[in-house]
Each structure stands twice: as structure tokens, then as C-alpha cells.
């Protein structure tokens, strides 16, 4: 009987950790979409708007990588799934890329 109670207590914990690791794998895959192609930073006019979008491009990717690394180390930072947080950062990244004249890959 004790074994049954112990197994019943462990099962939900195992399910949560498996779900979390699957979400981390999905978030890692999403990181591969953080690419901005067909932009030439050296040929752009250096304006405050261009600088803003370049900073946004770099920081959104850095945040996404940082969040994934934190989750891999067992630190859950948000109450929503990690993939949703990465999707939000990707939206910021994609918008900055487009403003700079680049093209981001479309997630599948």
C-alpha cells in the first residue's frame, strides 16, 4: 500500500518535469529562427532609430538564450510556458529585423 501511495505521489512530479523538458527542447528549436538575413549593418545610415532596432535585435535574442539556459538549469522564471516567452521575444526580434530591412525565417 505504501508503494502505491509513493508511486501516486511521484507520477505527477515526473509528468511535470517531462513536460518542462519538452518545452525547453521546443524553445531551443525556436532559437534557431533568431536569424536576420539580408541586412548590411555597415551600409546603414547610423540614426537613433537604426541603433534602437539593432539593440532590440541583439537584446531579444540574448534574452531568449538566457531564458532557455535558466530553464535548462532548473530555474523556472515565468508562470507561462517557456516556448510562449521565446515566441514573444522572437516577435520583437522579427519586427526589429524587418525594420532594418532584413528577412527572418518563418517558424514551421
Image: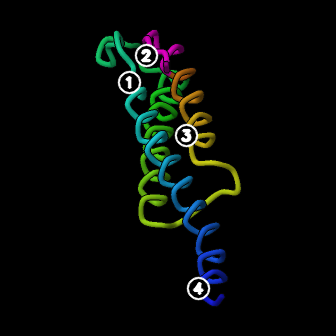
Residue under circle 2?
105
In the rendered structure, which disc, 4 or 2, sits on the residue that comes first in sequence? 4
Mark 3–mark 4 distance (CA, rounded to whole Å): 40 Å
Label 3 CA crowd tier, 10 Å (few <14, some 14–19, many 20+): many
Q: Position of residue 32 (x, y in %)?
A: 37, 30
Residue under circle 3?
86
| Numbered tag placed on residue 3 in the rendering | 4
Asked if marks 3 and 4 touch (Cβ < 8 Å), the reply is no
Mark 1–mark 2 distance (CA, rounded to whole Å): 7 Å
Secondary structure of the residue carrying tag 1 is loop
Residue under circle 1?
35
Q: Residue at x 39, y 20 (%)?
A: 36
Quadrant assignment, res 88 = top right
Instruction: Please report the bounds of the magenta region as a residue range.
Output: 97-108
Q: Residue at x 70, y 57 (%)?
A: 79
Q: Position of residue 55 (x, y in %)?
A: 47, 35
In the rendered structure, which disc, 3 or 2, sits on the residue that comes first in sequence? 3
The answer to whether residue 31 is magenta is: no
Amino acid at each position: 500500500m505504501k508503494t502505491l501511495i509513493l508511486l501516486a505521489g511521484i507520477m505527477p512530479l515526473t509528468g511535470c518535469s517531462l513536460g518542462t523538458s519538452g518545452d525547453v527542447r521546443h524553445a531551443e528549436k525556436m532559437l534557431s529562427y533568431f536569424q536576420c538575413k539580408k541586412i548590411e549593418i555597415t551600409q546603414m545610415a547610423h540614426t537613433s532609430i537604426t541603433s534602437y532596432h539593432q539593440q532590440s535585435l541583439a537584446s531579444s535574442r540574448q534574452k531568449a538564450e538566457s531564458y532557455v539556459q535558466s530553464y535548462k538549469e532548473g530555474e523556472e522564471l515565468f508562470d507561462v510556458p517557456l516556448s510562449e516567452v521565446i515566441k514573444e521575444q522572437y516577435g520583437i526580434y522579427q519586427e526589429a529585423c524587418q525594420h532594418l530591412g532584413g528577412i527572418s525565417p518563418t517558424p514551421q
